[in-house]
Amino acid sequence: AQKVTQAQTEISVVEKEDVTLDCVYETRDTTYYLFWYKQPPSGELVFLIRRNSFDEQNEISGRYSWNFQKSTSSFNFTITASQVVDSAVYFCALSEGLRGSTLGRLYFGRGTQLTVWP
Amino acid sequence: EAQVTQNPRYLITVTGKKLTVTCSQNMNHEYMSWYRQDPGLGLRQIYYSMNVEVTDKGDVPEGYKVSRKEKRNFPLILESPSPNQTSLYFCASSRRDTQYFGPGTRLTVL
């Protein structure tokens, strides 16, 4: 069974629309870490955010915000007022941590292709 | 400039011919990892290393080997490549939780 599920394979929006990318995870650990990464059309992978399981505060960074809900095992990513430059594949990932590190074995979702049209 | 480098960037080879993809980082990071990316499957971890001489299997280690003899290098070795190892490979390093990825190596095994 997948540990990280990104049910939305592709999403298309028009510029300035808000869009939410869903991420549902599965783990039996009480301490774990969740990540989002961005892969623009140029192909590089860019780290966006890490969230600890023991910190359920939502996070906002400019037009990006993340909603972590332990009760539903979800870590959703919202882009407000989307722009063409937001077009990319977005990956959600889970780590159960190892030897005091937030990393270790990492499980990725299959990614969501976001296309923002002008 | 902080970076993760991979070589080669592109490689076409034949079944069974041993190859090594190098990965090097200049940030003194302890954690390094290899991933493969395939259409529809996203990213899957092959191996990771928490520090020198410490390596662990990821999701899809079969057919791959790694070594971590020094902190900066983490080569990926395919002893006998097969066509199902045709993929885009990424190396990454991290000190805490911010992973820095290399530019990727596109491997084709004929």
Image (cartoon, rainbow, N blue to C red):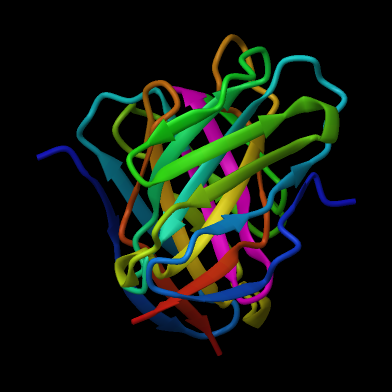
Residue B58: x and y in percent read 67, 42
Residue B24: x and y in percent read 28, 43
Look at 31% across and 60% down and name the residue there. Answer: B103
A42 versus B83 height, above or below: above
What residue range appears in magenta? B33-53
Residue A60 colored in magenta in the image = no
B6 versus A16 height, above or below: above
Look at 48% across and 40% down and name the residue there. Answer: A65
B64 versus B26 height, above or below: below
Quadrant in which the C terminus of chain A is drawn? bottom left
Residue B39 colored in magenta in the image = yes
Residue A75: x and y in percent read 66, 39
Q: Could you tell me how many numbered marks the image carries?
A: 0
Viewer can see residue B92? yes
State the residue in front, A12 or B96. Answer: A12
Residue projecting furthest to the bottom: B110
Look at 51% across and 70% down and name the residue there. Answer: A114
Viewer can see residue B18? no
Q: Quadrant of residue A68?
A: top right
- Secondary structure predominantly adopted by residues drawn in magenta: strand
Q: Quadrant of residue B63?
A: bottom right
Looking at the image, residue A53 sits to the left or right of residue B104; the answer is right
Look at 9% across and 40% down and name the residue there. Answer: B1
Residue A54: x and y in percent read 67, 12
Q: Quadrant of residue B104?
A: bottom left
Looking at the image, residue B75 sits to the left or right of residue A52; the answer is left
